[in-house]
Amino acid sequence: MPATRRPLQPLPLAATVLTGTVALYMALVAFGNITDFGTNQAFVQHVLAMDTTFKDPDLMWRSIESPTLQNIAYVLIIVWETVAAVLLIGGTVLWAREVRGGAGYAGPRRLSTIGLLMVLLLFGAGFMAVGGEWFAMWQSKSWNGLDAAARNVVLAGVALVVVQLRGADER
């Protein structure tokens, strides 16, 4: 007797697509930072050094001018991006299995949630709060990544909300 398939559920399909979109983005970001290390290394160095801000003496004590510390921060960012990408790819694969008729949504939801929270922490807490406010990145005309960070926070946030929704088949 053939296995019965449950009807296609729109929420798991949306969770698959959104998780996969963020996974692809994070994988490409990590890959780009690994294969073209210098481009975003310069970004991190300028933000941490605060050398393109208004140079307010009341803020400049926050700057990190040590190339070693700047590079450590950049490598940690790349590791964080890579781990998030791997988790999100795993979550996408698990969601795709569930869309086709699996055992439940707990596994894909858990993996996707961890990966998406990592993205939110990186771009929300890391780039927007720490980079934008602590290191006054908003003051820089040439090294301001706040708009890009905000786009990433929105995408990951929407994906996280969809991942957390319960479908009709889960009630």
Image: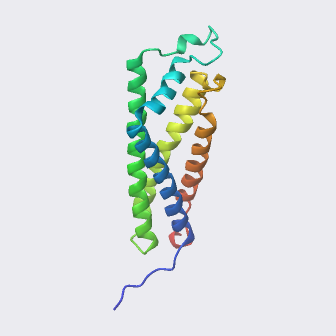
Q: Residue furthest top?
A: 57
Left/right placement of residue 80 relative to residue 154 reads left
Residue 56 sits above or below residue 111 on the image? above
Vertical arrangement, residue 42 with respect to residue 2, above or below: above
Q: Which residue does the image show at 62% across and 7% down from the upper left?
A: 57
Q: Residue 29 in the image: x percent, y percent?
A: 46, 43
- Report which quarter residue 167 is drawn in: bottom right
Q: Is residue 98 above or below residue 4?
A: above
Percent x, y of residue 39: 47, 32
Q: Residue at x 57, y 44 (%)?
A: 152
Of 148 and 32, which appears nearest the observer? Answer: 32
* Left or right: residue 136 compared with residue 121: right
Name the residue nearer the viewer: 70 or 14: 70
* Res 66 → quadrant: top left
- Specify the farthest residue to the left: 1
167 w.r.t. 117: above or below: below
Residue 101 at x, y percent in the picture: 42, 75
Q: Quadrant of the N terminus?
A: bottom left
- Chosen colour scheme: rainbow
In this rendering, the count of numbered labels is 0
Q: Residue at 51%, 28% (x, y): give it.
A: 43
Asked if residue 104 can be seen in this view, the reply is: no
Visible residue check, residue 107? yes
Residue 138, given in percent of the width and then of the height, sits at: 64, 26
